Amino acid sequence: MHTIKTYFPEFSERQLTQFEQAAAQYTEWNRKINVISRKDIENIELHHFLHSLAIYKAQAFEPASRCIDLGTGGGFPGLPLAIALPEVSFVLVDSIQKKLTVAKAVVEALELNNVEIANSRIESLKRTADYITGRAVEPLPDFYHRAKHLLVKKGKASHGIYYLKGPDIASAAFSGFRRQPNSSPVSQWFKEPYFEEKWVWHVPLQNDLMNE
């Protein structure tokens, strides 16, 4: 995990080892259950781990806070964030059990005690959290409308939804928002060409943000 070590010198040897173990687990499991494109599995560090960690760059969640990762699939962006933030509690949620089989296996192999796996639709989930994360699950306004009931009612300005999506989201996606969500280009942290059109979008914890 040379690239992760370069961008995150604060990570411990245990954390770097966990990323190595995760890469090996995903590579092995991807032969059985295709959660990552077989053409893309060799880029797991850059395209999946590092991309997920852009949220960590945008906002390092405070210790003892809670995060729900919706539409996690095989565990992105939630699982890399859980490695980076061992004092934060994560619930990785997806409606497709087959994908969660891989996420659960990786969590167990890495002995991540701060992660829970939940097979559920967003609308049926009975949890609350300080943070909600997701990666290109659906258009951001749709994601917000379906996920907002999971956010705590009172919290810090940094709380809310952190969403990984490309620049195309800016075209007509904000028609339902009173104010445009905060956006951060991933390329400000990671210099590889892959990240030139990747963004982190933050919808703060504010009830008046959407037109109801």
Image (cartoon, helix red, strand yellow):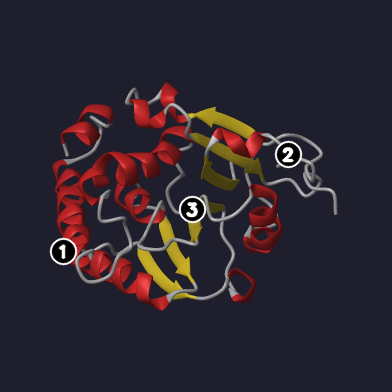
Query: What type is the residue that disc 2 sits on?
Result: Ala
Helix, strand, or loop for circle 2? Answer: loop
Which residue, given by chain and number where applicable, does mark 3 sit on? 65
Task: Measure how far apart labels 3 and 1 are at the Cα level.
Answer: 32 Å
Query: What type is the residue that disc 1 sits on?
Result: Glu
Q: Position of residue 94 (x, y in %)?
A: 47, 69
Q: Which mark is residue 187?
A: none
Q: Position of residue 194 (x, y in %)?
A: 36, 31
Which residue, given by chain and number where applicable, does mark 1 sit on? 28
Query: What type is the residue that disc 3 sits on?
Result: Ser
* Residue drawn at x 29%, y 51% as measured from the top left: 83
Badge nearest the viewer, 3 or 1: 1
Badge nearest the viewer, 3 or 2: 2
* Residue drawn at x 84%, y 48% as measured from the top left: 211
Residue at the front extreme, as displayed = 39
Res. 151 image quadrant = bottom right
Q: Which mark is residue 172?
A: 2
Task: Measure how far apart labels 2 and 1 are at the Cα level.
Answer: 40 Å
Between 58 and 72, the one lying in front of the other is 72
Q: Is residue 172 left or right of residue 116?
A: right
Helix, strand, or loop for circle 1? Answer: helix
Q: Is residue 56 left or right of residue 144?
A: left
User: Is 96 situated above or below 193?
Assistant: below
